[in-house]
Image (cartoon, grey):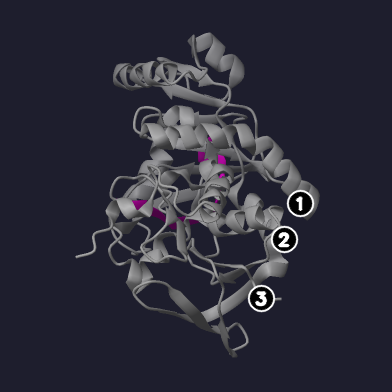
């Protein structure tokens, strides 16, 4: 059967778009190439628009709030279809301070959270220790954000992949044929080395930071922002996500602890830097001394797809049959359900424009 939507990409954005299309009765085809160091595989999985309240623009916060409402039903449907677990962790997030400067930052963030009508509460040191007994002795205070949950991105990815796998075609090399008005067709070499050609009335690019590879999108100010992470394994030490001004630590199933925070402007350089890895371990150890005894299971990098204004690009482009769902930066896991609904809304109502329109960057010159 000829696809009525062709989606190019292989991460959470592409697969959630495909899943939403399937749910709406479309027959999508996902042209998929596995990317090393993708944002999906490297993400922490924190679902916390509250904690981005001081830096995210209002439209993005609104989209993240919509996603927060959608999330529980969205993953339940995926769990039912895939028969796989999601790694959803509804325990909330503790923002913890170790000294006066930390506390000043957290207090400022608490004010922004309250302005956005999110729920949070200031905790005494005793209350913090009642929630997490393994925190280090020296604490200045903190706040608790009960609805700032987390999910295991790789488990979410596995669910989405299984739910959409009948619509996925792997490729080794791709060429998109177009003129000044529209995409005409796509030629690609599949995973078995066979040359294929296909067309569709609707095309969606959701290829993360690699979307910059397509020459007809060279007007988009898209870049990869590198982030390094560590995954430790051993005796579980925390039950909530712990965030400080310097690092975040996310508990995962099977005794895993995810540690991250770095942002580096190094293009697609995938080298691990000793200093950043040292910082992650040191800042984590300052709050959870028990990590000294854990094993390093994995260290890696991921490339966050960032646009100039750090807002996503979700909508139609200058080509009449091409839409984008890219540029999610640090928010890709958080906004996945709402972003997939929004891109299908734009496809069904192609003249719709909003704050996420890719055309905000377009000039015809």
Q: Are marks 3 and 2 in contact (CB under 8 Å)?
A: no
Give the side of residue 112 with respect to residue 238, left or right.
left
Callout 2–callout 1 Cβ contact below 8 Å: yes
Which residue carries the number 3 mark? 2
At 63% from the left edge and 38% from the top edge, which residue is drawn? 71
Mark-to-mark CA distance, 3 and 2: 21 Å
Going by the image, does 96 lie left or right of 218?
right
Magenta range:
290-307
Q: Quadrant of residue 88?
A: top right
C-alpha gap between disc 2 and disc 1: 9 Å
Rendered position, 312 above or below 221: above
Q: Secondary structure at mark 2?
A: helix
For residue 192, what is the image quadrant?
A: bottom right
Magenta span: chief secondary structure? strand
What residue is disc 2 on? Answer: 162
Q: Which residue is mark 1?
A: 84
Q: Residues within 10 Å of mark 2 (few under 14, many from 20)?
A: some
**At 29% from the left edge and 67% from the top edge, which residue is drawn?**
218
Q: Residue lying furthest left in this view?
A: 365
The number of numbered badges drawn on the structure is 3
């Amino acid at each position: 059967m000829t696809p009525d939507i062709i989606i190019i990409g292989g991460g959470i954005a592409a697969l959630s778009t495909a899943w939403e299309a399937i749910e709406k009765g479309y027959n999508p085809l996902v042209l998929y190439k596995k990317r090393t160091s993708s944002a999906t595989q490297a993400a922490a999985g924190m679902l916390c628009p509250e904690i981005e309240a001081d830096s995210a623009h209002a439209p993005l916060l609104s989209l993240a709030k919509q996603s927060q409402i959608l999330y529980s039903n969205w993953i339940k449907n995926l769990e039912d279809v895939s028969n796989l677990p999601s790694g959803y962790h509804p325990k909330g997030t503790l923002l913890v301070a170790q000294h006066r400067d930390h506390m000043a930052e957290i207090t400022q963030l608490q004010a922004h959270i309250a302005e956005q009508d999110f729920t949070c509460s200031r905790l005494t040191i005793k209350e913090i220790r009642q929630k997490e007994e393994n925190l280090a002795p020296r604490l200045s205070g903190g706040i608790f954000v009960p609805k700032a949950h987390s999910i295991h991105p790789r488990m979410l990815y596995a669910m989405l992949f299984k739910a959409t796998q009948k619509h996925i075609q792997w490729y080794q090399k791709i060429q998109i044929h177009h003129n000044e008005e529209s995409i005409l067709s796509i030629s690609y070499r599949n995973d078995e080395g066979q040359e294929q050609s296909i067309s569709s009335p609707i095309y969606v690019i959701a290829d993360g930071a690699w979307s910059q590879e397509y020459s007809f999108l060279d007007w988009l100010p898209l870049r990869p922002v590198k982030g390094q992470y560590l995954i430790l394994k051993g005796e579980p030490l925390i039950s909530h996500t712990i965030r400080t001004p310097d690092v975040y630590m996310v508990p995962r199933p099977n005794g895993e602890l995810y540690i991250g925070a770095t942002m580096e402007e190094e293009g697609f350089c995938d080298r691990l830097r000793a200093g950043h890895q040292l910082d992650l371990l040191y800042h984590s150890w300052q709050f959870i001394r028990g990590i000294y005894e854990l094993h390093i299971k994995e260290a890696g990098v991921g490339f966050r797809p960032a646009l100039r204004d750090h807002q996503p690009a979700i909508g139609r482009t200058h080509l009449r049959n091409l839409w984008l769902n890219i540029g999610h930066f640090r928010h890709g896991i958080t906004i996945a359900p709402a972003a997939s609904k929004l891109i299908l809304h734009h496809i069904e109502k192609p003249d719709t424009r909003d704050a996420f329109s890719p055309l905000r960057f377009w000039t015809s010159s």
